[in-house]
């Protein structure tokens, strides 16, 4: 649990830097660096809040009522948070400024009603009217309908037929848990148990939401109206057939399948970090343990509950639940930021902080532990990092690339073994098309996104441009010592060339959106040795420059995941997107261009008094179009990274006289 009990230090209180350069740029870098150093944990890591939409805190309240483990004080704080996030029209969006989402609004309404909000309260009336105008709660997504079935609000025919016997299917079968992404796998396996046994929430106050349905749930016949493809409709026919045949499944088969599902998720419970280290999987596992009769005082069950509680962010009057935590990612990126910002100053405090952070990162590398990635790469030695504090079954190449890159830049022989392992692991995780998925190689059974369960369209983990760019960013640093990586890099570059959009940008799967993807690829191209005059790079540069706003900054709306025609556009500039655009242009050799200088000026003019920047926007998707995130650290360290790199490349030798005058102190 993260409790807000500290205040940020003053810009000068924890900083002993030796740089006294008389420029606003130096001052901005010094103030941001000081604040960032003040947020380092004594163990060496950084971790910032990771906020999602209201689905997750609403589900936390639902979990308390499902288990009859209600904490009234915590529930009241979460309800306060939910009320504060409601849009004027009564709905709940997936990200700040987004349009209302039916599933998020249904869960938020249900959670607030469970917390005691009267249905005739103004905010509840507005939410209910909005839901009914969208077609009612029957239009909510599959995972929401699963929760409603458990609370006996809809019949079980309103959710896909996902019997636990799926666990017994052979690996060659078209649908198998090993064929889906890690996040889908960890969510689905305990859910198989919950849905197969048609569990019933305890729901001690018997709270229902019949008022949210246009057609009474038992009479509703269109729970799967979202299924449009021929494949999806064929699977729906099999779904109906499966329900008819279910009574014929022998008892011993069901028991065997249940045991296999139980053993699968219990083996991966992951201690105080939880199954998959992601909220939805952790809750499903906790509820499945209850369904299976594992007693409340069982140590694994107690730890499973504690793991969920550790995701809470509790403040004075409000609380919310994070979908997961991001310490490895945050620490590795902050390390890269401080390495860039301190390249000239050689500040002792910064160096000590970096040493502590890098030692912490090195200690978190996964080596010989079991992991699901081994299903596709059984002969590959381990060497990756996970995203969270602990998630040994699920390291990812994205975190591995940035963590190993930070270790390389330390130029310290004690990290040689960590770097060697990371390079081998990333090279070995390349998919056959040359690209990289985040957690698994060749997780590309695209037909699975057409099954009724996959209404979120993210059941698999195929290669993406942003992750691939960071992989060659690392391998490019190692290729001189490991010429065997050249073929891996070349194959990935070929993949990225094919993935470039016609206007010159790249899609961003894990950050919003095309500006993020383009930064990722151009950074990779730089370390991979692609010439700056390469047509792909020139085309990307033209695209980035064309998206700069009049104030000198850049911004991108999450709506670009729905409508690619607005990619690289937003009604405001953000520090995060401006920093990414600057870093991308600097990687492309554009340090002296006026667009870079205007972007730097934007960051300097929008820095807060405390040294940081403040973006209200959500800045990354969990699943594009379905689930979005706000990394609270992105507007703190990315701008500093961009300013640091600009200073290192441009001052004082190549500084434009006009900009130099604007940066100088009076």
Image (spheres, grey):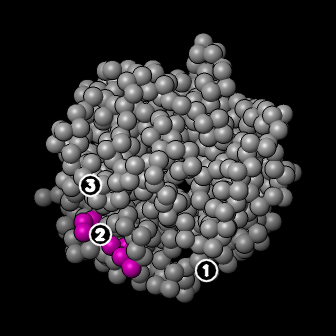
Mark 2 secondary-structure assignment: loop
Mark 1 secondary-structure assignment: helix
Relative to 491, residue 504 above or below: below
Q: Earlier in the sequence, mark 3 or mark 1?
A: 3
Residue at the spot x=68%, y=50% of the render? 243
Closest to the camera, between mark 2 and mark 1, is: 2
Badge 1 local density, few (<14 within 10 Å), some, or many (20+)? Answer: some
Judge by depth and name the residue closer to the eye, 566 or 456: 456
Residue at the spot x=37%, y=24% of the render? 205
Residue at the spot x=66%, y=63% of the render? 237
- Read off the magenta span: 565-573
Asked if the stretch drawn in magenta spans residue 303, the answer is: no
Question: In this rendering, would 156 be left or right of 215?
Answer: right
Q: Can you see residue 630? A: no
Relative to 351, residue 579 above or below: below
Circle 3 is placed at which residue position? Answer: 130
Circle 1 is placed at which residue position? Answer: 497
Circle 2 is placed at which residue position? Answer: 570
Q: Earlier in the sequence, mark 2 or mark 1?
A: 1
């Amino acid at each position: 649990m993260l409790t807000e009990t500290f205040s940020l230090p003053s810009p000068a209180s924890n900083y002993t830097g030796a740089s006294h350069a008389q420029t606003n740029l130096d001052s901005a870098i010094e103030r941001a660096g000081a604040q960032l150093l003040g947020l380092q944990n004594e163990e060496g890591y950084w971790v910032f809040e990771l906020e999602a939409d209201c689905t997750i805190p609403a589900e936390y309240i639902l979990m308390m009522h499902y288990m009859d483990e209600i904490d009234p004080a915590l529930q009241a704080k979460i309800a306060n948070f939910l009320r504060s996030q409601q849009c004027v029209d009564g709905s709940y969006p997936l990200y700040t400024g987004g349009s209302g989402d039916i599933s998020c609004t249904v869960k938020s309404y249900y959670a607030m009603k469970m917390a005691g909000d009267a249905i005739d309260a103004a905010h509840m009336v507005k939410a209910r009217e909005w839901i009914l105008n969208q077609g009612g709660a029957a239009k909510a997504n599959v995972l929401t309908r699963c929760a409603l079935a458990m609370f006996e609000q809809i019949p079980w025919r309103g959710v896909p037929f996902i019997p636990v016997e799926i666990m017994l299917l052979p690996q060659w079968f078209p649908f198998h848990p090993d064929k889906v992404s890690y996040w889908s796998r960890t969510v689905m396996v305990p859910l198989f148990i919950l849905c197969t046994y048609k569990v019933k929430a305890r729901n001690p106050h018997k709270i229902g939401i019949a008022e949210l349905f246009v057609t009474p749930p038992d009479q509703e016949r269109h729970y799967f109206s979202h299924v449009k493809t021929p494949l999806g409709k064929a699977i729906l026919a099999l779904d109906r057939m499966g329900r008819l045949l279910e009574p014929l499944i022998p008892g011993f088969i069901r028991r065997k399948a249940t045991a296999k599902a139980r053993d699968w998720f219990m083996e991966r419970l992951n201690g105080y970090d939880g199954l998959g280290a992601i909220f939805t999987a952790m809750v499903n596992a906790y509820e499945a343990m209850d369904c299976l009769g594992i007693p409340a005082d069982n140590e694994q069950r107690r730890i499973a509950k504690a793991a969920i509680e550790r995701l809470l962010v509790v403040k004075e009057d409000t609380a919310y639940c994070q979908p997961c935590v991001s310490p490895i990612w945050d620490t590795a990126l902050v390390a890269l930021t401080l390495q860039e910002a301190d390249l000239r100053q050689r500040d002792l405090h910064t160096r000590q902080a970096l040493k502590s952070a890098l030692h912490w990162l090195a200690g978190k590398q996964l080596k010989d532990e079991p992991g699901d990635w081994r299903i596709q790469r059984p002969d590959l030695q381990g060497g990756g990092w996970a995203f969270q504090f602990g998630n040994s079954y699920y390291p990812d190449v994205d975190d591995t690339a940035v963590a190993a890159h930070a270790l390389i830049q330390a130029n310290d022989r004690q990290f040689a073994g960590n770097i060697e392992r990371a390079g081998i692991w990333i090279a070995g995780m390349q998919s056959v098309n040359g690209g990289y998925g985040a957690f698994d190689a060749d997780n590309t059974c695209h037909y699975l996104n057409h099954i009724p369960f996959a209404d979120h369209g993210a059941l698999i983990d195929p290669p993406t441009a942003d992750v691939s760019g960071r992989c060659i960013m690392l391998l490019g640093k190692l290729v001189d010592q490991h010429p065997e990586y050249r073929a891996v890099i070349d194959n990935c570059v070929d993949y990225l060339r094919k993935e470039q959009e016609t206007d010159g940008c790249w899609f961003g799967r894990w950050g919003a959106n095309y500006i993020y993807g383009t930064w990722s690829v151009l950074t990779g191209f730089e370390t991979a040795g692609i010439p700056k005059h390469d047509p792909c790079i020139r085309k990307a540069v033209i695209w980035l420059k064309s998206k700069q706003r009049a104030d000198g900054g850049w911004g991108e709306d999450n709506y670009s995941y729905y409508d690619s025609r607005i990619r690289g556009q937003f009604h405001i500039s953000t520090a995060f997107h401006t920093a990414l655009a600057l870093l991308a242009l600097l990687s492309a050799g554009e340090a002296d261009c006026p667009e870079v200088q205007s972007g730097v000026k934007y960051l300097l003019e929008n820095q807060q008094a405390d040294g940081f920047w403040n973006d209200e926007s959500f800045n990354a998707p969990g699943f594009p179009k379905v689930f979005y995130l706000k990394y609270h650290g992105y507007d703190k360290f990315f701008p500093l990274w961009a300013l640091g790199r600009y200073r290192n490349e441009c001052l004082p030798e190549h500084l434009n006289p006009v900009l130099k005058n604007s940066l100088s102190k009076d």
